[in-house]
Amino acid sequence: MGRPDNGVRIGGAGGFWGDITLAPLEMLKTTELDYLTMDYLSEVTMSIMHKQLDRDPNAGWATDLEVWLRAGGMELLKEKKVKLVTNAGGANTDACVSRVLKAASAIGWTDCKVATIGGDCIGSKLSALAGTGEPFIHMFDHKLGSLLDHEDTIVSANAYLGAAGIARALEQGADIVITGRVADASLIVGSMAHSCGWAENSRELELNTPLADWAPSSVKNPYDVLAGWTLAGHLIECGAQVSGGNSSDWKEIPHLAELTYPIALIEADGSCIITRAPGEGGRITRRTVAEQMLYEIGDPTSYHTPDVTLDLSNATLVEIEKDQVKVEGARGREPPASLKVSACHRDGWMSSGFLMVPGPEVQAKAEMLDKTMRGRLAHLDDLQIQTEFIGSQSLTPPGLRKDLVPSEVMVRWTISSPRKAHLTHFARSIAPLVLTGPAGVAGYGARPRPREVLRFFPTSIRRVLVEPQVRIEHHQTWRHDLEERMPWLEDKVLARLEMISKFDNHPYWSKLASRMLDRLDESKVVKP
């Protein structure tokens, strides 16, 4: 457990798969933490991971995790006794865990316990779930029908799980928790439920029991506490976005090249202080916190999560010191009866290409270029063409545009069609416009390749229909298991194998020893 009497220090060292790879390593080097959380997932990320998994049974997870663990992160987690909680498992938690355990074994941490949280993937169960009457209607536009209308082309469907599985795994002794599609803030809520004794108090409860029921009897307002923990999680789940990244005050944020990531010091009552790791880069201000607080929440009085419905209308943000903002006043209600489902299905093909148009009369030339392209594609059915005139206020809302004359414009076309061959025809039509279109056109490159379109389809499912038991398994290496049962094995056998693999001059014996050690470093499942 953490230190609830003095607040629990939780780091948020990443906001998506593609964020600064070594940011969590730097955070571990420069500050003290109880838990380190990493949010790698978004709707588009899950789609990408499922496509990767279709091609490769060892893919489908956030591989950046292994990079920073092997760069020194694993040693720091062990040395500082920091619990790592991350959704890096994506679409393939088992493959992710296997690589994490290899990284642990490489530094001699052979008793490292890694828990996996599953149960979120419902793609293979849609037909059975539909038999219960679940409609799977589009969450935001009912006119788009049901996910079941696309059953033959579905790539992924993942329900957003809550914090219960994370808290239970930590209570059972996990050093690292790897999840699939868990709600972003639930990474932090699960850590707090463990640290503040909620998980210990609820060992006999099922994982689908409302998290508020896990609270010790001394907690009089569990939904308000969960609301505070969820808000703290929401504030650090996007990494450096709360510490100065992507800020409207970007001119006032120093040293963006050395931006540091946020830390939430969270209390058992739900209040928290948002600060950041030591360093010159970044700022934590009332404004940066307020911007992140309102990010992607919809109705601020009813932000739905799997753990609680969050009401921010009475939340207060007070700068108590430089780079420290105290957050309190969040209120909570019972969570919704349904869980959000992030799904996607195949929906044809798309391609994108561009050309540069210089002045004079640049806008007229750009529009003529577009007209010419459209004329040469007019014979193709079922073709959708979207044109952007970048540099000519294309990203500015119409009401805010000014009467400016650009000196150059990039014309970018995005083409979609159910027929892949149409995209090939488009790709062949770009370069000829340099000599057969308006004067001065340039900037063409290689012909763009068609890409499959994955259409995002958000929907929901009654939480009672999601598997009632989230799968939690602790993993250990075969090597650790053998060492526990035969302590003499390390000195008499394994150490010798290590020497042979590294220093034996005979390639056969060296490779054989390496293979044997690799097999011993593979994981076996130890059920709690």
Image: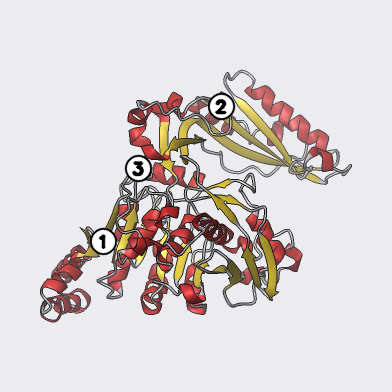
Residue 262 x/y as whole percent? 57, 68
Asked if residue 164 shows in the view, the reply is yes
| Mark found first going from the N terminus, 1 or 2 | 2
Q: Secondary structure at mark 2?
A: helix
Give the camera-side residue of 212 and 528: 212
The crowding category of the residue bearing disc 1, from other C-alpha atoms within 10 Å (few below 14, some 14 to 19, many at least 20), is many
Q: Quadrant of residue 274?
A: bottom right
Three-letter amino acid code of the residue under disc 3: Arg
Residue holding disc 2? 142
Among all residues in the image, which is located at the extreme right? 403
Q: Residues within 10 Å of mark 2 (few under 14, many from 20)?
A: few
Q: CA distance from mark 2 to mark 3?
A: 33 Å
Colour setting? secondary structure
Question: Where is residue 218, by image quadrant?
Answer: bottom left
Which is more N-terminal, label 3 or label 2? 3
| Label disc, if present, on residue 55 of the rendered structure | 3
Q: Which of 104 and 189 lies nearest the eye of the viewer? A: 189
